[in-house]
């Protein structure tokens, strides 16, 4: 997972109406039900089928840290798919997405402007079309660089150019050295 993917997933998870299962046994039972068997769950988590069965029966209660992290990630990835889809749809059509970041931002502009990169803390509401582009790119397997380019383009239009009211000759926004990144729907 990347910084952008994690951020987008965390924003969508805020829309969940019920908390995901907490205990290892409950998480394992949920995955077994979703994937229709212990074999697929064992292969996905890279453990033996017998280990999965023991978690399901609560014979093992405390997974080792790496397995606990994989288990949590896989459950959250599958938890409440309709609500996840509805939250993404709403952001992509009407609500938009808010990006809160502390990163080095600069831009390419004509000579004579102050295009120097500097660390800025921005909280900017992006219009729905950028939320749609970010979610579509994420679903199609885009890497961090591609998601960063979409976010940079959105910041260029919304923050630097103020939807066409200023900085019309701005060519490219550089979005690097990300210290903090958070999305909200």
Image (cartoon, rainbow, N blue to C red):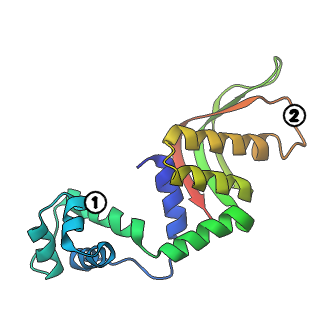
Looking at the image, residue 96 sits to the left or right of residue 40; the answer is right
The CA distance from mark 2 to mark 1 is 46 Å
Residue under the point 13% across and 67% down: 49
Q: Using a 10 Å C-alpha cutoff, classify the residue at mark 1 as few (fewer than 14 neighbours), some (14 to 19) or many (20 or more).
A: some
What number is the disc on residue 168?
2
Q: How many marks?
A: 2
Residue under the point 65% across and 51% down: 133
Q: Position of residue 83 (x, y in %)?
A: 54, 76
**The image quarter in which residue 166 lies:** top right
The mark nearer the N terminus, 2 or 1, is 1
Q: Using a 10 Å C-alpha cutoff, classify the residue at mark 2 as few (fewer than 14 neighbours), some (14 to 19) or many (20 or more).
A: few
What number is the disc on residue 70?
1
* Element type where label 1 sits in the image: helix
Looking at the image, residue 9 sits to the left or right of residue 36; the answer is right
Q: Position of residue 148 (x, y in %)?
A: 58, 41
Q: Which of the two marks, 2 or 1, is nearer to us in this view?
A: 1
Residue 173 vertical placement versus 76 (above, below): above
Residue 19 vertical placement versus 97 (above, below): below
């Amino acid at each position: 997972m990347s910084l952008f993917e994690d951020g987008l997933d965390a924003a969508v998870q805020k829309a969940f109406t019920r908390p995901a299962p907490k205990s290892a046994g409950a998480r394992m039972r949920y995955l077994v039900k979703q994937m229709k068997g212990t074999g697929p769950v064992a292969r996905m988590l890279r453990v033996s089928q017998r280990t999965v069965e023991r978690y399901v029966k609560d014979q093992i209660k405390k997974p080792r840290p790496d397995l606990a992290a994989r288990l949590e990630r896989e459950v959250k990835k599958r938890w409440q798919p309709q609500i996840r889809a509805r939250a993404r749809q709403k952001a992509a059509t009407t609500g938009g997405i808010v990006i809160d970041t502390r990163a080095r931002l600069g831009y390419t502009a004509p000579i004579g402007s102050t295009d120097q990169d500097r660390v800025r803390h921005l909280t900017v509401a992006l219009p729905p079309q950028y939320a749609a582009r970010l979610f579509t790119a994420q679903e199609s397997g885009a890497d961090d660089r591609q998601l960063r380019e979409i976010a940079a383009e959105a910041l260029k239009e919304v923050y630097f150019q103020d939807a066409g009211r200023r900085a019309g000759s701005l060519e490219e926004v550089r979005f690097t050295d990300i210290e903090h990144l958070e999305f909200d729907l």
